[in-house]
Amino acid sequence: MAHDLTIAPSILSADFTRLAEAIELVEDAGADFIHVDVMDGHFVPNLTIGPPVVKSIKRVARMPLDVHLMVSDPDRTAQWYVDAGADVVTIHIEAAVHAHRTLRAIRDGGAQAGITLNPGTPASALSEVLPYVDQVLVMSVNPGFAAQSFIESSVAKIAEIARMCREAGVSPRIEVDGGIDPVTAPRVVEAGADMLVAGNAIFGAEDPAEALRGLWRSALSRMV
Ligand code: DX5
Ligand code: ZN
């Protein structure tokens, strides 16, 4: 079963002193989720925000919060983000020692569970946990920073994960994060993605609302 196409602007590229305005702007322009990048300066070479800020964002956002945990110890800390109000909590398969247990705990806490993998991790690493997730996030850059170049091999990986899901009889959303713009968006959608994260392509644009609508139009042209 295919999902409707959804777009999740990443506020990593927004002005952190004016997050509420940035969120309102993209929500008015049709964003479906707000993508929140949590980085711990250890799993990735950058440091962003933690539970208190997620909690504040939750107070102002109308759309669900899609929280992407780029942290070394998601088994211990995922619950912090469920408690802070995240609607989806996505953990990295490379960082979770007990991925299955943590995914279940996220769901038990009332949030949706997501699993993600770095560009250097094969799709097969996800096979055991696919039945336990609401969303699979394919990283199309090495996580840590906005505005990096899309890694080409991500297209084949998305297609492979879509095939694995069909064979397993499951249908999580397939999300892509990193270097998504009006050129790469239709390509990943054609490969089977139905949820697009975009930071720089939206917040780096002169008119973020128009950039979001442009992304939407480009991607929708290939939605199967
Ligand atoms: C990268 C983050 C992304 C990032 C995407 O580590 O996980 O969500 O904000 O930014 P763009 O769309 O600029 O590549
Ligand atoms: Zn992200």
Image (cartoon, helix red, strand yellow):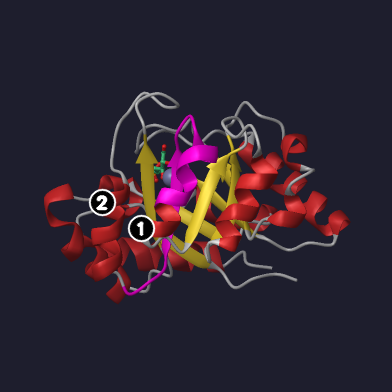
Whichever of labels 2 and 1 marks the residue nearer the N terminus, that label is 2
Q: Residue furthest left?
A: 17
Which image quadrant for residue 96? top right
Residue 211 position (above or below residue 90):
below
Magenta region, residue range: 62-80
Residue type at numbered disc 2? Pro
Question: Could you tell me how far apart the alpha carbons at marks 2 and 1 are, in whole angstroms?
Answer: 7 Å
Q: Position of residue 95 (x, y in %)?
A: 56, 31
Q: Residue at x 37, y 36 (%)?
A: 39
Q: Secondary structure at mark 1?
A: helix
Residue 91 is situated, as x and y percent measured from the top left of the image, at: 54, 43
Which quarter shows the N terminus? bottom right
Instruction: Identify the residue position indicated by label 2 in the image.
Output: 52
- Quadrant assignment for ligand 1: top left
Magenta stretch contains residue 108: no
User: Horizontal placement of 167 versus 209: left or right?
Assistant: right
Residue for point 30% across, 65% down: 58
Judge by depth and name the residue closer to the eye, 174 or 91: 91
For disc 1, the marked residue is 84
The reply to whether discs 2 and 1 touch (Cβ–Cβ < 8 Å) is yes
